[in-house]
Amino acid sequence: MSRGMLIGGGVMALMSGMVGAVLAAVVIVAETPEAHVDRYLAALASDDLLAAGQLAGLEAGTPLPLGDEGTPTTVRVVTSQERGEGRVAVTAVYGGETDTATVIFLLEPDARLLGVIPQWRFVAPPVARIPVGIDQHDRVRVAGRTVTTAGPGATTEVAAFIPARVSVTNAEPFLEAPSRVIRPRAVEAAPVILQGQPSERLVREVRRQVTTLLDECAEQTVLQPAGCPFGRVIDDDRVLDRPEWQRVDEPRVGLSRTANAGRFSLDASATMQIEADVQSLFDGSITRLVDEVPAEMLGIVVLGPDGPAVTIYP
């Protein structure tokens, strides 16, 4: 055997060894449960939801879950642990500066992709089902999208990649409700139900409707306007002309929650003024009556599809 052949054989052996080392590195570094989780989280962090869905194991045609609303600054696989039956639990840290989540992913060998390089998949797609709603209305906004429920206090499910940052905010301008921001860590997520309170806009709208009612009542030139929350009784005098009513001030409006979702109790008041010429039944003298009369109102406010409906109790 010539020296050239020996050198050539040595080079081939060296090349073969290098290829084997590279292949081993790919198997160890790139095709491990940790690497699969790392690729999934990297896709989620970069808003590549299509790749995240593929790595999550979603079936073709499945609507993509919600992605991450935040800007993750921490994407790191911490550790892994065998769980038996070939499964591996991978612990990862993911999130922003103030909302980092620690999540445990369970993976198993992908029997569909058998070959020299092993492949891994999630035992269950890392997609959370989050029930969302608001106690006083049927609409909320999830990640900027309006979601409608069956009614006030009811919930509907939205899907989000685990552990994406998801915000749930109020979608009804007549309500105020603190927003919620979560990072789901499990497939079955806890319900997120916002607690709604009357907003200043709702108070203004109710005051407007109460004002309209009082002003319309003031057009009735009688002592006791029909269907109105005020009136005047005169016992010892006779009214000589038609009484004139006018509203003195802006109605004061109070709204409070009730046991029924989407309904608020109303407590309102205002001051009305009556003017009329009256004649005494005793001496026949005529005087000009100018008197302030309280208007006290109780009722209910219902938030409907066309806005708040105000009902004043008789």
Image (tube, grey):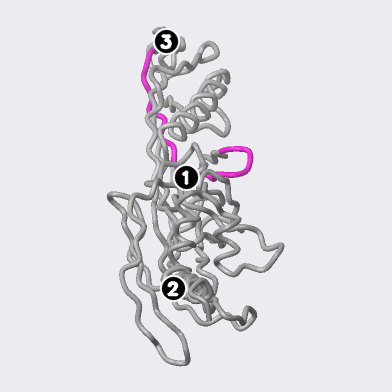
Magenta span: predominant SS is: strand
Say if mark 1 contacts mark 2, CB within 8 Å: no
Q: Say which of 300 and 139 sits in front.
A: 139
Residue at 56% of width from left, 62% of height from top? 157
What amino acid type should be assigned to the residue bearing mark 2? Ala
Image height of 177 relative to 247, above or below? below
In the structure shown, which secondary structural element does the residue marked by tag 2 occupy?
A: helix
Q: Say which of 100 and 179 sits in front.
A: 100
Q: Residues within 10 Å of mark 2 (few under 14, many from 20)?
A: few
Say if mark 1 contacts mark 3, CB within 8 Å: no
C-alpha span from label 3 to label 2: 121 Å
In the structure shown, which secondary structural element does the residue marked by tag 3 occupy?
A: loop
Q: Nearer the viewer, mark 3 or mark 2?
A: 2
Left or right of 97 in this view: 60 = right
Residue corresponding to mark 1: 170
Query: Is residue 294 located in the magenta-colored stretch of the structure?
Result: yes
Choose the circle earlier in sequence order: 1 or 3.
1
Specify the segment rendered in magenta: 290-307
Q: Residue furthest left?
A: 98
Q: Say which of 202 and 284 sits in front.
A: 202
Left or right of 69 in this view: 91 = left
Residue corresponding to mark 3: 284
What amino acid type should be assigned to the residue bearing mark 1? Asn
Residue at 54% of width from left, 77% of height from top? 117
Residue corresponding to mark 2: 21
Q: Position of residue 298 (x, y in %)?
A: 44, 42
Residue at 37% of width from left, 68% of height from top? 103
